[in-house]
Amino acid sequence: MKEEIDLAKIRVVITNIQRMCMDDGPGIRTTVFFKGCNLKCPWCANPENISFEVEYGREGLRQEKIYGCYYSEEMLYEELMKDEKFWSNTGGGITFSGGEPLLHLYRIQGMLEKLKKRYIHLAVETALQVPPKYLTRILTWIDYYIVDIKVLDRKLCRTVLHGNLDGYFDNLRILGSEGKEILFRIPCNMEYTATHENLERICRLLCEFPDVPVEIFSIHNMGRTKYESLGKAYREFERISGIQLEGIKNKLEQCTDAPVVIRHI
């Protein structure tokens, strides 16, 4: 018999807790993937994290795949603390990803407070395109912000990503005024983010945050099988070459005093 879920204690839905991560902040990290995002990026590699509800897919002809698991604060805290020795030995910690983690973290503020009392480094990977109230609720506990730079044209952002740049810029100003540590991360594709016009807008943004380091990477097509499993339409993007990434890197380096690094995925 399946264990009954106590809905009164449920706080979040999570698709994956990935351990021993090296690219989601300093040190060895445990990355938590929340289920649910307000954006609809056409190149998204994690389609299972767009819907806020548990979903069911197929692996092969018969095997059912469940995307999402309910967690209470207590359950999640106990699961994460299994990795504490790795964080303390490497200067690592926990990174909250998704989906859009800022739409979930306010529900588990009690857990965030418990983690900070143990001096655990906390980071988020965020598109930052949410109402500022979601950011301000968790500012006290989050140390490090990995912030996407995507489409910076208001009309395109709204029509293509279903996003809101006004909230994005408001949130960036909040992070700047609070002196929070930020890393900009740019997913590059020639159709939207690495066009000449968008790169010019990115350069203007970097000039406003000249001390923030930047990572760039080419989007990939590794999410295809998850789209197929969920019965969702998949759009393939041409992968940007290493030479093209070097050209983007060189352009962005002219707009910032911080390092620009190519991340290989």
Image (cartoon, grey):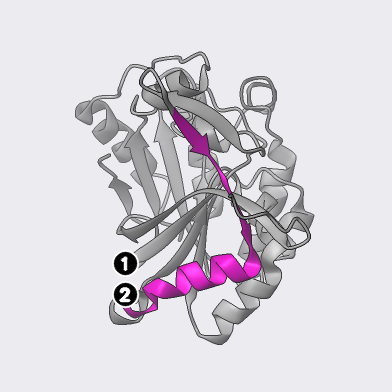
From the viewer's perspective, tell me whether residue 10 is left or right of residue 212: right
Magenta span: 64-86
Residue 257 position, x and y percent, is 39, 57
Residue 5 position, x and y percent, is 68, 54
Residue beneath the point at 67% across and 36% down? 38
Label 1 close to label 2 by CB (< 8 Å): yes
Residue 255 vertical placement versus 91 (above, below): above
In this figure, which residue is indicated by the disc labeled 2?
A: 86
From the viewer's perspective, tell me whether residue 122 is left or right of residue 164: left
Count of labels in the image:
2
Residue 239 position, x and y percent, is 30, 22
Q: Residues within 10 Å of mark 2 (few under 14, many from 20)?
A: some
Q: Which secondary structure is most common in the magenta stretch?
A: helix
Question: The residue under label 1 is which amino acid type?
Answer: Ile
**C-alpha separation, residue under disc 1 versus residue under disc 2:** 7 Å
- View extreme (front): residue: 1
N-term mark: 1 or 2: 1
Front residue of 27 and 152: 27
Residue beneath the point at 35% across and 59% down? 19
